[in-house]
Amino acid sequence: MHIQLLIDTSAKYLAVGLSKNGKVIASTQYEAWQKQSELTIGEIDRLFKITNINPKDVTRIVVTNGPGSYTGIRIGLTIAKVYSTTRNIPLCLVSSLNMLSGARDKKIALIDARSKRAYVGIYQDGKPLIEDKVLTLEEIKQLINEYQDFEIVGDAHLLDKNKVEVDIIQQLEDLSSIIDDVENPHLAVPIYLKD
């Protein structure tokens, strides 16, 4: 049996879930800006209880490692690393921008970096077409002219576009099949991208 614990605390949402043999069986996702440190462990514990899954049965951890909120990234990554190393199970790191883009179609993912800047990633079928970076909104507008047939996800409102809701846990589950585990969870580091 393959059971994954999926975690994202990299932005304003708290999203945790469990999947079994490639199918999400329980998840929660809600706005918890600056409260992830207080809520994440409790939500993970609640999912174990409602699914009757023993935490010892988890076979892999999937977590976003940024870019995004400095504190939020560290919360999710720390929980994942501790769980992975104490249980000696694989750890899979997913860029927050890749998570927003998912494993299908053509997407431009944006996360607000404040000061009229955003983290941006451009993905096709879960694979990056450019390296994730932080750019000004003006630079992003110029960049997306090259990718006009791509859907904008994440903080699309920064470019006066309609917001597209994303099922974070389903996106992580989908991506987990195409992203390799880190060789050494102790060396897993956050992606901040800011200067």
Image: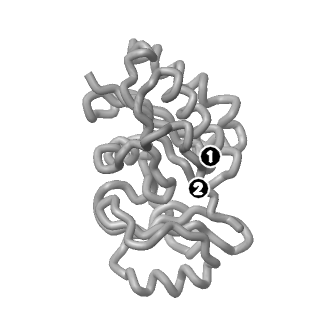
Residue at 54 percent across and 48 percent down: it is 65
Task: Say what amino acid the circle numbered 1 marks.
Answer: Ile
Position above or below: 150 against 180: below
Question: Does residue 186 appear left or right of residue 113 in this picture?
Answer: left
Of pointers 1 and 2, the one earlier in the residue sequence? 1
Which quadrant of the figure contains the N terminus? top left
- Check disc 2 and report the residue beneath it: 191
- Check disc 1 and report the residue beneath it: 73
* Mark toward the viewer: 1 or 2: 2
The image quarter in which residue 137 lies = bottom right
Task: Say what amino acid the circle numbered 2 marks.
Answer: Ile
Residue at 47 percent across and 65 percent down: it is 109
Residue 84 position in % (x across, y down):
49, 29
In the image, 126 versus 87, the foreground residue is 87
The image quarter in which residue 188 lies = top right
Circle 1 sits in a helix, a strand or a loop, which is it? helix
